[in-house]
Image: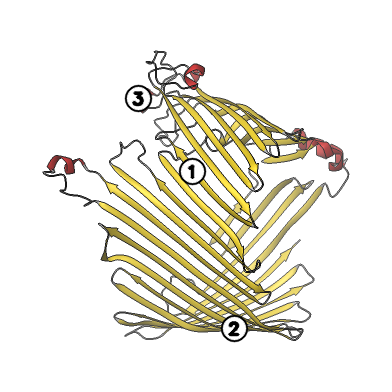
Amino acid sequence: MKKIVLMLCLLCPLPLWAQQIDLEHIGDFFGKGQPLKVYGGISANTIYHAGGMENGRQPFTWNLNGTLGLNLFGKISLPFSFNLTNAGANYSYPVMPNRLSLHPAYKGVTAHIGDVSMSFSPYTLNGYQFSGAGVDVATQKDWQISAMYGRMQKPVSWDSLNPTNQPSYRRMAKGLNLQLRKEKYAIGMIIFHAADDPESLPLHLDSLNIYPRSNLVISWNGMVRPAKGLELSAEYANSAMKLDNRDHSVAPNYRWNLLKYLMHQANNTTFYKAFNAKLNYSIHKGTVGVGYERIDPGYQTLGAYYFNNDLENITFNVSHPLLNNKATIAVNVGFQRDDLDKTKSGTTSRMVGMMNLNYMPSDKFNSTLTYSNFQSYMHIKPQFDYINQTSPFQNLDTLNFKQISQNAAWNLNYSIRNNKLRNHNINLNLNFQDAADLQDGVLRKGNGSQFYYASTAYSLLFVKQQLNLVAAFNLSYNTIGRNEFLTMGPTLAANTRLLNKKASAGFTTSYNASNSGEGAQGQVLNLRLNCSYQLLKKHNLTLSAIRQTRWMPARPALNDLTATAGYNYNF
């Protein structure tokens, strides 16, 4: 009977979203485990609120929600849920999906059938969903082969009554990825082709500036390890984009390009290139690397939803252990610029730097320091500069902007003494953020902001009593433009487990005061109490209460109380 139910589920795949089926071990799928499992839960909560703060909350609210679901063979889930409150009711039912995908696998061969996505490389096919079939073959150690064919875009006619529905032509695509990987070297080639069918719609979409396009991309990639610890990898991609398939004109003879012999070269056919290379060297448990990437302006591929182009990236990274492997340092630096063909009205360049230093001399002491720096430089070239300029030096660098953002964080954790009776721990955390806009190299007042945050905490754990005590102090100081704000205050907390760890209780109190350049802004006192009890492993009772008192200048004190009681049952 179980096998009959399973076969019916396999023959009626509508409730399936994506199923990975290992055909090599399909026999293990029958006769093991529960074919039908019912799961779910129910929870009820009541919330009482009272106070003088104007927040629009009701004095008493309640809600009842639950979930009931069916699970078939651990593969298919059909959930049903409900939610009832004193404000209304809401239900949700299992919805049949409009997409189906199957991924059967057998001895190194994996098929992708239905609405699936595959990725060959960032410049060719990169995660675009299509309706069709694909396959990944890795039956041999050295060779890897991937192929796909399917519809990437269905035909959609223009509907004046539904302008949000994007019209499109039917787009079919096919691709092949061949990779040979050895221990010392690797080489691969990718071919991807996609084309729109002009006859897939009764009316053309020229008036909407939508034309049937076609795209052919060929990519070569390789890797070589000429020496121990040294690895060089690179990828070079050519993309030919025909903006209108109906154009059968013959374009003039451009400079040499392989794709012009493989794809009809019409007047509206454009060719693009993309290249990246990485060099990494591992030595003495450390790594040094450099990378370069260049993508032509206008580079496109129909195998990706979105693509950044007109950029050049240079990256450098290094990591190395220090002090007999007790410390590790890692540094990453990158530089990016655009306007490679000098045709834009403005250019932008960015520099990103990151440093991470970790020091752990023993199990009791751990310290981490991180720093990152982001800079963005923009040079605007309006035509009025050239029209009104009377000398070569007039208006020089008058429209140069630089944005700078820095982030630094230091975390220190120290265990003073750990034994079977007590554990003592100290933690210190410091954070700094800085953002500024520079014009002509000058930081004008009001164009910058800084944020400083510091916290320290001491915790004491009584192991046998399962009692944890925490004392902390927090401070934050930030400047935004011409304004300054300072907030600080202590926190005390206690948490314990009771009744053979079936119950837990905790109490937290915190106080903080805020000041600005104009004087005191306010004070807040919080008292929090929470407890819970687990009954028969599946029932859980919770109770929590929060009392907040807020003082503000020239205003009476405001008190707010929120209490919550809850019950949860899971099966």
Q: In front of the other: label 2 or label 1?
A: 1
The relative height of residue 444 versus residue 514 in the rendered view (above or below) is above
Q: Which residue is mark 2?
A: 458
Q: Amino acid at mark 1?
A: Tyr
Q: Is residue 534 left or right of residue 200?
A: right
Q: Secondary structure at mark 2?
A: strand
Location of residue 423 in the rendering, given as x and y in whole percent from the top left corner: 69, 83
Q: Mark 1 and mark 3: span between their CA atoms?
A: 41 Å
Sequence-wise, the earlier of marks 1 and 3 is 3
User: Compared to 384, does 471 lie above or below?
Assistant: below
**Distance between the Cα atoms at labels 2 and 1?**
47 Å
At numbered mark 1, what does the secondary structure look like: helix, strand or loop? strand
Residue at x-position 33% and y-position 75%? 484
Circle 1 residue? 292
Counting from the top left corner in percent of width and height, residue 311 is at 41, 41
Q: Earlier in the sequence, mark 3 or mark 2?
A: 3
Residue type (three-letter) at the residue carrying disc 3: Ser
